[in-house]
Image: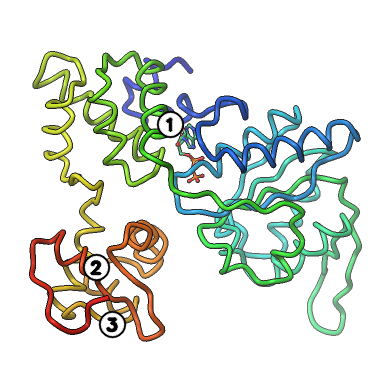
Amino acid sequence: RSLTAAEAEGDERAVEAVLRPRTLDEVVGQVRVRDQLGLVLEAARRRGRAPDHVLLSGPPGLGKTTLSMIIAAEMQAPLRLTSGPAITHAGDLAAILSGMNEGDVLFVDEIHRMSRPAEEMLYMAMEDFRVDVVIGKGPGATAIPLEIPPFTLVGATTRAGLLPGPLRDRFGFTAHLEFYEPHELDLIVQRSARLLDVAVEDDGTAEIASRSRGTPRIANRLLRRVRDYAQVRAGGVVTLPVARAALDLYEVDELGLDRLDRAVLDALCRRFGGGPVGISTLAVAVGEERETVEEVAEPFLVRNGFLARTPRGRIATAAAWEHLGLSAPPVNVA
Ligand code: ADP
């Protein structure tokens, strides 16, 4: 589909697909991961074999899906996409696996959310390229072995720690994606601006980059919102003042904290006196799922020194109090 058609429909997913790097060379940042993965793929190509299973971990929007697509593209192999929550029964997985051809790449997003029986079936498939499909129930049940052609599993998870050890151990290559540096995000924003035909100035893209929570997906999204603002309320060009005004309007603050990030800090400081407070309690206080707070908001807040995890619960740091414009109580401050 053409870019304009996708955009005209306001189809954010389609626009995101257009902005995805297609080769390892186009991937910005993540230098070490790119290097290591490049080597794994090149070696597999020379041997004429499917590469080892790959596990990608890291917060949402850092490029896990993109990398899985690149792995398939570089191996010139078909890619099948599914996700942990979509595999509720072992049978769902057996159906997917039985349809695979040699060398196919299977991407399982949120692999930590797969059901237990499916997980156990996956261990066997990963290691022996074979699964036992159980037919029937109770004493009459029989296991029918099913051979699977060698394939490459690419698993993605927001937190590798959530994966059971046996599953984690079956990946031959594991990469953890880190938040991006502002200069890397700036390159991504500039590249996207070119692809979307948005007129930008250097300090405009730098401003978007510095407020993007270290996350390419957010950088691309903010670019599109700033462009809207530029086209409707300014001269169409993304300048520094335009970027600032637009991002203020969308409630993205100077440090890139969004509404949820601030809600978490606000609850932590104002309602719980800075903590320590359990993650579930904190999630209820901001009206969000525990997973969302833990996997989306928290990693960025921790990495930027606003929140600390302690055995007794989450606590606000001095930087958090300061950022909210509050004075910290004399105790409890990390
Ligand atoms: P995840 O699967 O980790 O949630 P995605 O792979 O879907 O993240 O990436 C989200 C968007 O961010 C993609 O559409 C892509 O355009 C962009 N992106 C991610 N990583 C990079 C990168 N290293 N360089 C350029 N763009 C990137």
Judging by the rendered image, the residue that carries numbered circle 1 is: 16
Point out which mark residue 276 bears.
3
So how many labels did they put on this image? Answer: 3
* Element class at badge 3: loop
At a point 78% along the width and 64% down the height, the residue shown is 123
Task: Choose the circle earlier in sequence order: 3 or 2.
Answer: 3
* Element class at badge 2: loop
Asked if the residue at label 3 sits under 8 Å from ligand 1, the reply is no
Judging by the rendered image, the residue that carries numbered circle 2 is: 287
Q: Nearer the viewer, residue 7 or 73?
A: 73
Mark 3 or 1, which is nearer the eye?
Answer: 3
Q: In this view, does 27 lie to the left or right of 78?
A: left
- Expressed as whole percent of the image width and height from the top left, the position of residue 47 reads 91, 35
Rendered view: 126 above or below 135: above
Residue type of the residue flagged with mark 3: Pro
Inter-mark Cα distance, 1 to 2: 28 Å
Residue type of the residue flagged with mark 2: Gly
Q: In the figure, residue 51 lies in which quadrant?
A: top right
At a point 66% along the width and 37% down the height, the residue shown is 35
Inter-mark Cα distance, 3 to 1: 38 Å
Asked if the residue at label 1 sits under 8 Å from ligand 1, the reply is yes
- Callout 2: 10 Å neighbours few (<14), some, many (20+)? few
Inter-mark Cα distance, 3 to 2: 19 Å
Task: Choose the circle earlier in sequence order: 3 or 1.
Answer: 1
Q: In the figure, residue 198 lies in which quadrant?
A: top left
Mark 3 or 2, which is nearer the eye?
Answer: 3
- Callout 1: 10 Å neighbours few (<14), some, many (20+)? some
Task: Choose the circle earlier in sequence order: 1 or 2.
Answer: 1
